[in-house]
Amino acid sequence: MVAPSQITVTWHSEIAEIPKAAWDAIAAPLKTPFLEWDWLHNIELSGSVGPRTGWQPCHLSVQRDGEFIAMAPLYIKGHSYGEFVFDHQWADLSYRLGHEYYPKLVGMTPFTPAVGYRFLIAPGENELTLSQVMVAAIDQFCDRQQLSGCNFLFVDPTWQKTMEQLGFRAWLHHGYIWSNQNFDNFDDYLGAFTSNQRKNIKRERKAVDKAGLSLKMMTGDEIPAHYFPLIYRFYSSTCDKFFWGSKYLRKPFFETLESTYRHRVVLAAAYTPEDDKHPVGLSFCIRKDDYLYGRYWGAFDEYDCLHFEACYYKPIQWAIEQGITMYDPGAGGKHKRRRGFPATPNYSLHRFYQPRMGQVLDAYIDEINAMEQQEIEAINADIPFKRQEVQLKISELH
């Protein structure tokens, strides 16, 4: 007689409690790089997340007879910083209704507004059944810990459908994504734009040449070891200049990438004619297969249009050469949309445990999403493409 299988659900205060091999057996095959064990572990190990930063790791795992069959990176949050889904209006409503909004439970890769979050479920397992088990555990945990709600951000679009079946409501947002329309070269990419915008892009690239700067793309073992702490200096400089209070990642995070994650790192480094060893500007990206993600950038001195060259044009040129199909340049959109990054839908998923908040969510989320869809369409109608019918269609992320 065969004994019945034993299912165990466990909460973990750090990802190190779950073996890397077990985690990556499920996470590594995904298209997103940001659910892999090393990336998440580096964030924790560096002290970038933890009780003192308002990101308390409490990851969920499911085991059958001692074998990990499902996991989810989760965090108890005491604020909404570093999420890039701006839920302050929900927090304000909660307080006006007389309820605390924080703490809350959040599922995402910290500080990473890139689509792809989902439960990690082993191949061959029933996704809906295991998701039900995990959601039931989350509901019980949130009730016990008196958390206001559970929120999954930048979710995988396929997994989203499963979670909507389980009662989560989807909130529409948008990012800015470049997709490779089988471009042969950079000039082919320029051909999608109006004449005036082509001239503008060429002028911006010439401004970098006029300053005497040259840019070099490096990846993997091409990157000198001492560049990894240097990434932090550029990142820190940009945060101090333009985004005060948003320096979420600490120096050890970047230093540890050198030994654990350099195979996914791509840099666009800018040099002066006098020194081709020490960059004056740096753009930091992550690549997985044919997807490229822009993360951070910085420059020690001001150079006209260097930001556009290091963060948009040089990576796009390299992406075309490498056969990259999608480039997500990161948060923000003021400059991106005029350079071929259309507004592209993404969703977050939400469940409020206070009944009145849940009622408001159910009553108004469809209207909110319709307004966001109108915003997306208005943004894309204003992109300076050569022909109105030109549409840069975004490949599904998963």
Image (cartoon, grey):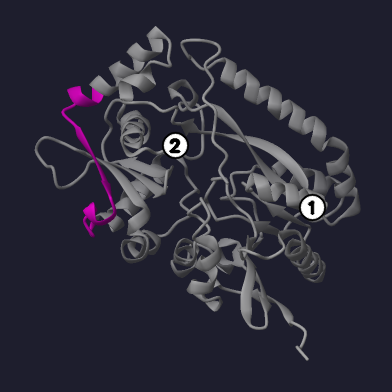
Residue occupying the point 42% across, 14% down: 193
Task: Report the quarter where the N terminus lies.
Answer: bottom right
**Which callout, 2 or 1, points at the residue further toward the start of the chain?**
2
Number of the label disc, if any, that sits on residue 325: 2
- Residue 303 % position (x, y): 26, 29
Identity of the amino acid at label 2? Thr
**Residue at the left extreme of this rendering:** 274
**Left or right, 367 with reference to 173:** right
Q: Disc 2 versus disc 1: distance between alpha carbons?
A: 34 Å
Identity of the amino acid at label 1? Arg
Residue 217 shown in magenta: yes
Residue occupying the point 46% across, 61% down: 39
Label 1 belongs to which residue? 351
Q: Quadrant of residue 125?
A: bottom right
Residue placed most toward the observer, 248 or 164: 164
Stretch of the chain drawn in magenta? 207-226
- Residue 112 % position (x, y): 52, 49
| Badge 2 element | loop
